Structures are given as structure tokens and as C-alpha cells.
Image: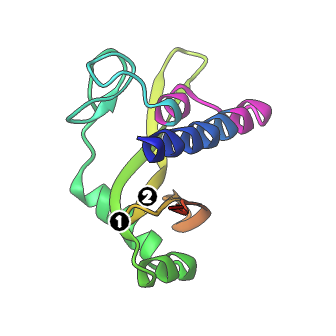
């Protein structure tokens, strides 16, 4: 129970930092907020069982998109080191940018994605991949150390 609370506290802190960074740089989008805060899994904002989206609408990510993102991540030397250290790729989440033009035209494109990695119960890593440039732009590694005392 304590370990679950600790992990949630750490992830909440990371989400708050990412969200604050997006606001400070004026780059935060609704999709960023939805990704970082998760939202309601029962059809409100955020992730559901079969996808994620707003108001219960889910977004299906093609296997080709996931494969492309994973291939970019696996070509990065730091990600290769994580994989060699026992991390496994567990998920790919696109960051969807929505642009509304002056004439009201709406364009949505997933130019960035987050690859999630896990190492047993002790480590998590979030790899940011710029899909258009074909490179990893950031890696955030979270680890947990438990010291049991008699």
C-alpha cells in the first residue's frame, strides 16, 4: 500500500512539472494535459480501456505508428542501455497537437510520442520521441528504493 502511494506521489509530481513546463513555455495543449493527468477511465477526460480521448471518444493508435515510434526509441543509445538493464517497453502514447487555423480549419497530428518502459517494480522510464525528426528528445527515469527494517 505504501509503495503504491509513493509511486502515485512521484508520478503526480512529474505530471505537475511537465504541465507547469508546458504552461511556462506556452506549449501545453489539451492533449498534453490529458496525457499528464490521466483523467477518468470511465469515459470522461483521459484514458479508457481501449484508448484515450475527450468525452468518451477513444483514439486508436495504429500498430505501424507504434512500431515507428519504438524503432526510433530503440535506435537511441540511452534507450538501448535501459533495455540492456532490464527495462521493457510497455506502451506508446502519442501526443496529439491540434491546430485551429484562421478560417476555422482544424488539423490534428501526432508529431511526438511517449514510450513507457518499466523495470520490474523498481523503475519506470518515459522516453519522449519526436516522430517527425526521428529522434529521442528526452528521457525521464523514475526509480524506487525500498529499505525494509526489522
User: Image quadrant of residue 85?
Assistant: bottom left
Q: CA distance from mark 2 to mark 1?
A: 7 Å
**Which residue in the structure is indicated by mark 2?**
115
Q: Colour mode? A: rainbow
Left or right of 135 in this view: 28: right
Crowding near the residue tagged with mark 2, few <14, some 14–19, many ≥20 C-alpha atoms within 10 Å: many
Residue at position x 24%, y 39% in the image = 60
On the picture, is 9 further left or further right than 95? right
Front-most of 27 and 84?
84
Percent coordinates x, y for residue 59 in the rendering: 28, 34
Mark 1 residue element: strand
Q: Residue at x 61, y 17 (%)?
A: 102
Residue nearest the viewer, comparing 13 with 48: 13
Q: Which residue is mark 1?
A: 89
Query: Left or right: where does residue 70 sit relative to residue 111?
Result: left
Residue at 27% from the left image edge and 30% from the top image edge: 48
Estimate the x, y position of residue 30 in percent, counting from the top left. 53, 25
Specify the segment rendered in magenta. 20-35
Amino acid at each position: 500500500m505504501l509503495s503504491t502511494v509513493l509511486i502515485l506521489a512521484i508520478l503526480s509530481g512529474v505530471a505537475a512539472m511537465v504541465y507547469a513546463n508546458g504552461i511556462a513555455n506556452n506549449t501545453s495543449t489539451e492533449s498534453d494535459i490529458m496525457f499528464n493527468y490521466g483523467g477518468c477511465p470511465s469515459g470522461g477526460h483521459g484514458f479508457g480501456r481501449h484508448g484515450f480521448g475527450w468525452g468518451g471518444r477513444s483514439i486508436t493508435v495504429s500498430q505501424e505508428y507504434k512500431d515507428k515510434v519504438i524503432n526510433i526509441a530503440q535506435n537511441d543509445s540511452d534507450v538501448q542501455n535501459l533495455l540492456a538493464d532490464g527495462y521493457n517497453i510497455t506502451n506508446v502514447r502519442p501526443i496529439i497537437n491540434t491546430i485551429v487555423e484562421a478560417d476555422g480549419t482544424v488539423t490534428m497530428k501526432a508529431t511526438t510520442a511517449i514510450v513507457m518502459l518499466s523495470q520490474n517494480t523498481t523503475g519506470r522510464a518515459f522516453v519522449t520521441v519526436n516522430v517527425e525528426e526521428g529522434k529521442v528528445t528526452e528521457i525521464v527515469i523514475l526509480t524506487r528504493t525500498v529499505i525494509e527494517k526489522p
